[in-house]
Image (cartoon, grey):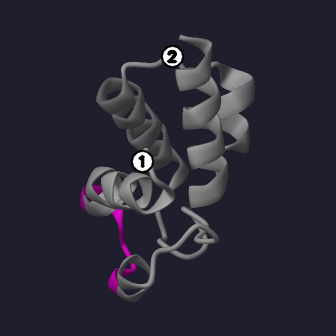
């Protein structure tokens, strides 16, 4: 999956949880889920569960703790898809 396609897929996943519309409209690989999009930590867990469902992967706690930006989420997703 291309980087742009994955960012679009992640946008659709995080949209219900975003509290900063301007941050969402400017979402890119460097966007921080908590700082830029104002997603709280409880909702960040929901985002990760939605990512697991969307990509049919399991994300361990260690990987979950690193998924704070769009790029780190994409890196984790690609790594997990590569393990399949």
Q: The residue tagged with tag 1: helix, strand or loop?
A: helix
Image quarter of the N terminus:
top left
Residue 63: percent from left, percent from top: 70, 30
Specify the farthest residue to the front.
2
Can residue 64 be spotted in the picture?
yes
Q: Which percent across, then down, holds residue 56?
A: 37, 19
Q: Residue at horizontal 32%, vertical 25%?
A: 53
Q: Mark 2–mark 1 contact, CB under 8 Å?
A: no
Q: Which residue is mark 1?
A: 43
Q: Which mark is residue 76?
A: none
Q: Residues within 10 Å of mark 1 (few under 14, many from 20)?
A: some
Between 81 and 21, the one nearer to me in the picture = 81
The numbered dot on residue 58 is: 2
Give the label, 2 or 1, closer to the camera: 2
* Few, some or many residues within 10 Å of mark 2 (<14, 14–19, 20+): some
Residue farthest to the top? 84
User: Measured from the top left, where is residue 25 in percent x and y?
Assistant: 35, 83
**Residue 4 lies in what quarter of the image?**
bottom left
Q: Which residues are magenta?
A: 16-21
The correct choice, above or below, for 46 with respect to 61 in the image is below
Residue at left offset 55%, top offset 76%: 36
Q: Is residue 33 above or below residue 55?
A: below
Helix, strand or loop at disc 2? loop
Res 69 visible? no
Provide residue 7's location: percent of width, then percent of height.
Answer: 43, 59
Q: CA distance from mark 2 to mark 1?
A: 18 Å
User: Vertical placement of 5 versus 46: above or below?
Assistant: below
Q: Is residue 56 above or below residue 12?
A: above
- Which residue is at 58% across, 46% downward? 73
Viewer-side residue, 81 vs 52: 81
Does label 2 or label 1 sit earlier along the sequence? Answer: 1
- Does 49 lie within the magenta span? no
């Amino acid at each position: 999956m291309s980087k742009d396609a994955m960012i679009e897929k992640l946008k659709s996943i995080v949209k219900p949880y975003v509290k900063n519309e301007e941050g969402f409209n400017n979402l890119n690989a460097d966007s921080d889920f908590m700082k830029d999009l104002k997603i709280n930590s409880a909702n960040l867990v929901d985002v990760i569960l939605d990512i697991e469902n969307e990509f049919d992967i399991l994300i361990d706690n260690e990987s979950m703790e690193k998924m704070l930006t769009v790029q780190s989420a994409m890196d984790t997703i690609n790594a997990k898809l590569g393990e399949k």
